[in-house]
Image (spheres, helix red, strand yellow):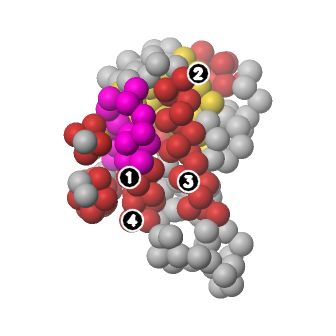
Amino acid sequence: MPANRIALVEGDIAVQHVDAIVNAANTSLLGGGGVDGAIHRAAGPELLAECRTLGGCPTGEAKITKGYRLPAKFVIHTPGPIWRGAPSPVGAVSTGEGSGVGGRDEDRLLANCYRNSLSLAVRHGVRAIAFPSISTGIYGFPIERASRIAVREVKAFLEKESGIEKVVFVCFSRGDFTVYQSALEEIANQ
Ligand code: AR6
């Protein structure tokens, strides 16, 4: 059952003992604030040096580097979408009116982040992987909506792919933890 393979913790992703941690990066892959800054600080300058060789990464796609001084062997860098749309129900078809250009595309791009990160992880033999709450900090994606997309994508991936044994959602605050807990109860345990 996928639910047994999904864990939720409150804390710092940079200290997680997993094979790979995911970085909520930007398209330059050259570092930033938030979780990106924390990962680069903990990994050391070699991480930025390797990132410089990657030529950036489009939103929703993913690139992998070594973890350097992190407990994790790999870092998977994925730029999430910047939230611009007005909230509408997950799965609703946007008319594009009143919700900005991106109402639906942000959902799709965020889902791509999870899916592409997991595919890349499998290709590198990763068995345990930790995700932060991509796009819900500086990029402003509403966390209730983002957490449901995250859980739905991870669950769907685990159902078809047995190579990944454990996915850990790492929440940076008690409030975020509670939101993810609700999403997990609603989706993963079905
Ligand atoms: N461990 C786990 N989660 C964390 C940590 C940490 N050490 N630090 C922050 N978070 P954000 P975004 C949470 O802003 O919204 C960067 O400058 C944070 O509380 O890091 O995708 C990049 O370079 C929030 O819940 O990422 C981009 O320019 C979540 O991580 C931009 O920010 C994501 O917040 C990306 O914005």
Residue type, mark 3 in image: Leu
Question: Compared to 106, does 86 lie above or below?
Answer: below
Question: Mark 1 — residue?
Answer: 151
- Report x, y in % for residue 79: 61, 44
Residue type, mark 4 in image: Glu
Residue type, mark 2 in image: Thr
Left or right: where does residue 43 sit relative to residue 47? Answer: left
Q: Which residue is more in the foreground, 97 or 178?
A: 97
Query: Which label's residue is closer to the chain start, 2 or 4?
Result: 2
Magenta region = 154-172
SS at mark 3 in the image: helix
Q: CA distance from mark 3 to mark 4?
A: 13 Å
Question: Mark 3 — residue?
Answer: 110
Residue type, mark 1 in image: Val
Task: Answer whether residue 62 is magenta in the image.
Answer: no
Task: Answer whether residue 170 is magenta in the image.
Answer: yes
Are there few (<14), some (14-19), or many (20+) residues within 10 Å of tag 2?
some
Task: Determine whether label 2 and label 3 are within 8 Å by CB.
Answer: no
Residue depicted at x 52% and y 62%: 141
Are there few (<14), some (14-19), or many (20+) residues within 10 Å of tag 4?
some
Residue 77: which quarter of the image?
Answer: top right
- Report x, y in % for residue 187: 31, 59
Query: Which label's residue is closer to the chain start, 2 or 3?
Result: 2
Question: Mark 2 — residue?
Answer: 65
